[in-house]
Image: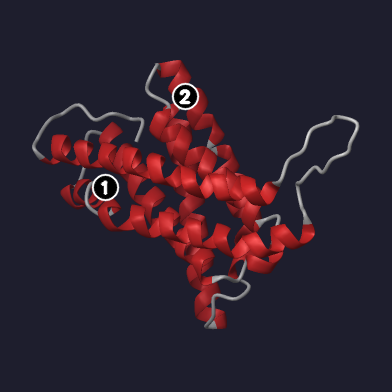
Amino acid sequence: MAHLLQHCHDTGWLVLAIAMIQFYMQKGSHKGLYKSIQKTLKYFQTFALLELVHCLIVHTSMLVTGVQVSSRIFMVWFITQSIKQIQNEESVILFLVVWTVTEITRYSFYTFNLLNHLPYFIKWARYNLFIILYPVGAAGELLTIYAALPYVQKTGMYSLRLPNKYNVSFDYYYFLLIVMAFYIPLFPQLYFHMLRQRRKVLLGEVIVEKDD
């Protein structure tokens, strides 16, 4: 299953990378880029849920994988897909580029590691590029959610007002504010986890946790 996941994910993100480059070369602008790749993005990012199943099977920690997968699926389905007015925001392209580079690097690392032939530049990229990419990606996600707030507040989307037969209220606008606030405790956990992994791997230790 691990081999299948790696192959599918690596292929998927390579397809997305090529599609984004081709679009920008043809149009000379990022406007319309998200719409052109959204079907492929939704498919491969949702497919990442199988990573959580894999974590359960091999009994590895789900914290890092769970945070990454759930936050990205949320961004794809409940932010950019649901609020089409923000699809041309520069912040959307920002996190898309970061996700793409991160995943291609990550799955290239896993693939070559399984083949017992890991080029040093891939190892170096895996444990150095994140230092810049993770904060930039988080910033892109937060800016995109922030850009969505006025549309959510205006339309009342995904909100449930009282009175109703369930006698329960839910305000998606405030929920998004809470989501943004959760980045404060969760992002440092992910980031410092990767920094610890970086020290372990680049100092020559052989064992690499698969849950990052």
Q: Nearer the viewer, residue 134 or 97?
A: 134
Q: Nearer the viewer, residue 53 or 157?
A: 157
Task: Give the residue furthest to the left.
Answer: 203
Check contact, mark 2 vs mark 1: CB within 8 A: no
Sequence-first disc among 2 and 1:
2
Taking 1 as reference, is 83 left or right?
right
Q: Amino acid at mark 2?
A: His
Judged from the image, the secondary structure of the residue bearing numbered disc 2 is helix
Q: Amino acid at mark 1?
A: Arg
Taking 22 as reference, is 174 left or right?
right
User: Which label is found at residue 126?
Assistant: 1
User: Which label is found at residue 54?
Assistant: 2
- Quarter-of-image position of residue 147: bottom right
Q: Residue at x 57, y 57 (%)?
A: 145
Q: Residue at x 63, y 54 (%)?
A: 79
Q: Position of residue 10 (x, y in %)?
A: 44, 46
Q: Position of residue 131 (x, y in %)?
A: 26, 53
Within-10-Å neighbours for mark 2: few <14, some 14–19, many 20+: some
Judged from the image, the secondary structure of the residue bearing numbered disc 1 is helix
Q: Residue at x 50, y 62 (%)?
A: 143
Quarter placement of the C terminus: top left
